[in-house]
Amino acid sequence: MPCAKAGDASSNRDGIRLFMRIEGPRIRDVASDAPPRYVGKAGWPGNSDAEMPMRPAFAVLLLSAALSCVISPAWAQASLVQSTPAADATVSAPRSIKLTFSEKIAATSGVQLSMADGMSIPAKTSLSDDGKTLTARPTSPFMTGKWTLSWHAVTAEGARRSDGAYIFTVK
């Protein structure tokens, strides 16, 4: 097939007409108002020196994604995995309350036991050897009724604090 001159119409084997204008290092489709595509070193669109700054930007993006996977455990929050008494359970007055978390927590984590009328019971807390279970021992007896257990957990690294609450009933 002979080379097309600027502004010429040529056709391919199937009879589809192609309109292209060659302007130096750019190829422009005459049939549409699309901006010219730059032809790079290998003669393919998208391989130009104008797109070269994208490679370092992509490398930085890829590196930051990889680092976030490595560093993310330091930003993890401790979430409540199991509790005794369980949420919405009806139990006799518990002597101790155990909260197990997904991460190791700091000794500064704690609980608060309160009723709807504002009455609360202080509790002495201790941390298990593995650092994931917080045990609270109430220092006063429970009254019958609905109790709200509010907890806060600080990760062992001290990076994140998480809070939560649930209700249980003492019969």
Image (cartoon, grey):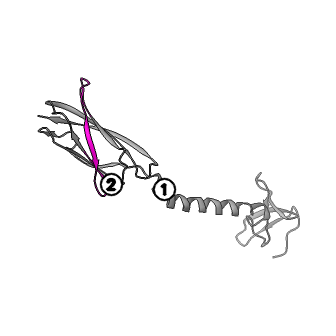
Q: Amino acid at mark 2?
A: Gly
Q: Residues within 10 Å of mark 1 (few under 14, many from 20)?
A: few
Between the residue at mark 1 and the residue at mark 2, the CA separation in whole angstroms equals 20 Å
Above or below, 138 relative to 83:
above
- The residue that mark 1 highlights is 72
Query: What residue is drawn where x is 15% and y is 30%?
Result: 143
Q: Is residue 75 above or below residue 87?
A: below
Where in the figure is residue 151, as x and y percent of width and height?
A: 32, 40
Magenta highlight range? 113-135
**Does residue 94 appear in this view?**
yes
Closest to the observer: 87 or 32?
Answer: 87
User: Residue 83: horizontal and vertical position, in percent?
Assistant: 24, 47
Magenta run includes residue 119: yes
Q: Residue at x 11, y 39 (%)?
A: 92
Q: Nearer the viewer, residue 12 or 150?
A: 150
Q: Of tags 1 and 2, which is closer to the observer?
A: 2
- SS class of the residue under badge 2? loop
- 61 sits left or right of 108 in the view: right
- Percent x, y of residue 14: 70, 70
Tell me the residue at 14%/35% (across/down).
170
Label placed on residue 131: 2
Horizontal relation, residue 99 to residue 42: left or right = left
* One can see residue 38 in this view: no
Instruction: Using the image, tell me which numbered label, if any, was put on residue 143.
Output: none
Image quarter of the N terminus: bottom right
The residue drawn where x is 53% and y is 58% is 68
Three-letter code for the amino acid on which mark 1 is drawn: Ser
Give how far across and how far down residue 120 sits, in percent.
25, 29
Q: Residue furthest bottom?
A: 1
Camera-side residue: 154 or 15? Answer: 154
Establish if 138 lies above or below 54. Answer: above
